[in-house]
Image (spheres, rainbow, N blue to C red):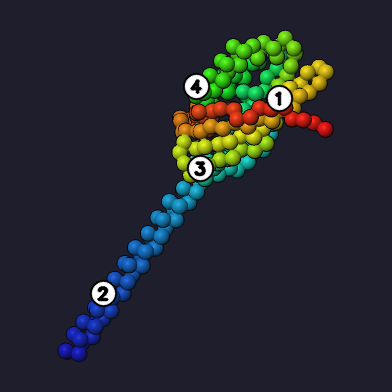
Amino acid sequence: MFTQFKNIDTAFKHIKTFSLFLIIACILVSGFAIYKSFDMVSTNNAKVYILANGKAIEAFSAERKDNIGVEIRDHVKMFHHWFFTLDPDEKVIQRNMLLALNLADQSAKKSYDNLKEQGYFTNLISANISQEIAVDSVELNLDVYPYYFKCFATQQLVRSTSTVVRRLVTQGYLRNVSRSDNNPHGFLIQRWETLENSDVIQP
């Protein structure tokens, strides 16, 4: 009889141990399943499909810090494009300047006002000169904030009889601001100045 009780007690201990391991295994499996579910949801939420030319293209979201250099370079390029791409048309000049000044602070507005007072835009219109710019490179220093940049570009002043090529070097700083339709990258150029704007001697 005692042997029977001993066997029952041993069986109970085995069942208790087995049940404990089963509960731990269930908790681990459930935790892993929950973790994978959240990970899958996060991955799916990071995917975006963009419709371009009738085709759905998959895109992935990323943290701002992952693309900050790319965004800053594009912001600087767009500012210089709008500020220096001019046609002999007052409305075109005003539109481009408005787009450029949305990307910079009063330092750019001051440069625009100085050019206007000097009659620069009037001369473009009266002489039928088109001005174009190509940004060659943008140097960045992301180790300091506001972020420093130096922009190297080539200007072309196209007249009916000739084309003048100029070397342009500017510098400034960028700080973070809210994104908007007028400022999609969420940066504002400040303390912007022209370091060099000289004719390139062509052979």
Residue at 62% x, 24% y: name it: 82
* Mark carried by residue 16: 2
- Where does the image place residue 179, in percent across and percent down from the top left? 49, 30
Is residue 167 rendered to the left or right of residue 114? Answer: right
Residue 130 visible from this viewpoint? yes
Of 9 and 125, the residue lying toward us: 125
Mark 1 or 2, nearer chain start? 2
Distance from the alpha carbon under mark 4 to that under mark 3: 23 Å
The amino acid type of the residue labelled 2 equals Lys
Element type at marker 4? helix
User: Residue 173 location in percent, x, y?
Assistant: 51, 33
Alpha carbon separation for disc pair 1 and 4: 23 Å
Q: Is mark 1 on a helix, strand or loop?
A: strand
Can I make out residue 52 in this image?
no
Say whether marks 1 and 2 touch (CB < 8 Å). no
For disc 4, the marked residue is: 106
Who comes first in sequence, dot 4 or dot 3? 4
Q: Is mark 3 on a helix, strand or loop?
A: loop
Label 4 Cα neighbours within 10 Å, binned few <14 / some 14-19 / many ≥20: few
Residue furthest to the left? 2
Sequence-first tag of 1 and 4:
4
The circle drawn on residue 132 is: 1
